[in-house]
């Protein structure tokens, strides 16, 4: 019998097109989650059952420009070799960006310091068929000055219960460090950076800012919505397809 | 009986994701061409059988950032109204960019002065799942200096029989005004502008330049390939999915 090998911890960075998936998280018998797919493929490549942790779950239909994961393996091969093998078996809508050895205590979710999500809006009346899976189409004019004023009122450390689709057992206090507006041709990007986001929070923030942009809510109402802690006070949950997990910092 | 209405000529600019289509041109009983789809929808909107002409056919799987079409209709409505109605019925992978009245003699193909095609290459080893339908992945290093030298030898007025997948009954002489190389992050774009392109010509030009980039052909061989008029002398036909009809000039 060979001795028990020492387990090595790995940090894996993925990108994925979430269109066809029911989100990141494995859910009992629900097939077609990204976690389930990744654990199946990674177990095949490593030759043993392997669990994988991500920086956080992404909802059904949400994309990841960068999602960071961690897993352990008794692997003698170099990370480059493992990355090459993994790329050979990945489907075309999941990409392995990088793979490296990680400190023993590194955990993709628990070690995460900050995340950036980007909500992509296609604001031109001209159609863009090539971005149809990756942007929400908003051809009606948006009051961007009002949206920016509302975003400023939401930045900071708040109880975001009003922007969460589930009632929280634990604290709903989170810190949003910044909400930036970036223009790229016909596209407007809402860039949210913070220490953590509640269930559906970015999509409800985007949906609320779009209500402000359309003149159905005003920036002055934001403090009251936060204080209400009432989901019904905020705007709707914007569609998943416009949302990207953009970057994860450690 | 109402009198015969005067026919109005229209110029329609489309964009489309060619992934699911068998190219532009209607072909007998072959379903799922863009022309067939457009004629069906336009006939429905206009309430009468309508034929549509494009600046040229695009192959199966080739995309159009801009494809220009012309058609005639006895239409009293303003182009804006017709554009709105057309947008309501178009599938998500075909977009109507603009619609305007045209001179009686305007014809999308016959009046065309110059076309630009772009062949998009993803040259990074990092995967980009969001461009997988719109770029050809070329992770191996390319000798761009050699590709540029080869491109220079191809620019100008030549008989391009060696770069055509079908034997031409008429002249195979065409003028390529320029082949430009554009870098955008991990993407390399080959931009072909000319007065006309033969069947599969841009894809064979791209395939030949890629052979040069990989060191399997040299720039010095280009004049001989042109002179041979032999399809077998040039490189392979690059996959359709990397090719875009980018712009049509009149």
Image: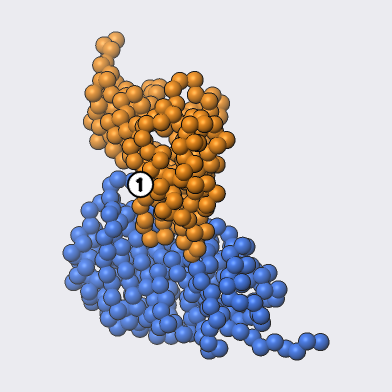
Chain colours: A orange, B blue
Please provide percent x and percent y for residue B250.
42, 82
Frontmost residue, A75 versus B5 = B5
Which image quarter holds the N terminus of chain A?
top left
Query: Which residue: 51% across, 30% down?
Result: A229
Residue B134, quarter of picture: bottom left
- Check the image and report above or below for B74 versus B63: below
- Check the image and report above or below for B47 versus A20: below
Please provide percent x and percent y for residue B196.
39, 79
- In-image side of B28 versus A72 (left or right): right
Identify the subunit bearing mark 1.
A
Residue B232, quarter of picture: bottom left
Query: Which residue: 35% across, 46% down?
Result: A180
Circle 1 residue: A180
Query: Which residue: 28% across, 38% down?
Result: A98
- In-image side of A31 versus A34 (left or right): right
Q: Is residue A34 visible?
A: no
Element marked by disc 1: strand
Please provide percent x and percent y for residue A153.
40, 40
Which image quarter holds the C terminus of chain A?
top left
- In-image side of A16 versus A27 (left or right): left
């Amino acid at each position: 019998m060979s001795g028990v090998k020492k387990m090595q911890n790995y940090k894996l960075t993925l990108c994925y097109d979430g269109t066809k998936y029911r989100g990141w998280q494995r859910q009992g018998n629900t097939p077609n989650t990204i976690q389930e797919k990744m654990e199946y493929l990674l177990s095949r490549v490593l030759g043993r059952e392997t669990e994988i942790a991500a920086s956080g779950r992404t909802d059904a239909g949400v994309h990841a420009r960068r999602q960071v994961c961690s897993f352990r393996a008794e692997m003698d091969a170099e990370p480059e070799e493992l990355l090459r093998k993994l790329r050979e078996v990945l489907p075309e809508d999941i990409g392995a960006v990088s793979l490296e050895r990680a400190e023993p205590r590194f955990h993709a979710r628990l070690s995460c310091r900050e995340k950036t999500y980007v909500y992509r809006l296609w604001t031109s009346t001209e159609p863009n068929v090539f971005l149809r899976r990756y942007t929400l189409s908003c051809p009606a004019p948006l009051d961007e000055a009002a949206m920016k004023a509302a975003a400023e009122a939401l930045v900071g450390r708040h109880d975001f219960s009003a922007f969460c689709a589930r009632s929280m057992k634990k604290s709903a206090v989170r810190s949003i460090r910044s909400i930036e507006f970036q223009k790229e041709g016909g596209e407007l990007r809402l860039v949210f950076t913070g220490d953590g986001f509640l269930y559906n929070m970015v999509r409800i923030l985007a949906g609320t800012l779009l209500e402000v942009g359309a003149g159905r809510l005003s920036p002055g109402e934001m403090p009251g919505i936060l204080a209400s802690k009432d989901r019904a006070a905020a705007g709707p949950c914007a569609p998943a397809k416009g949302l990207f997990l953009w970057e994860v910092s450690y």
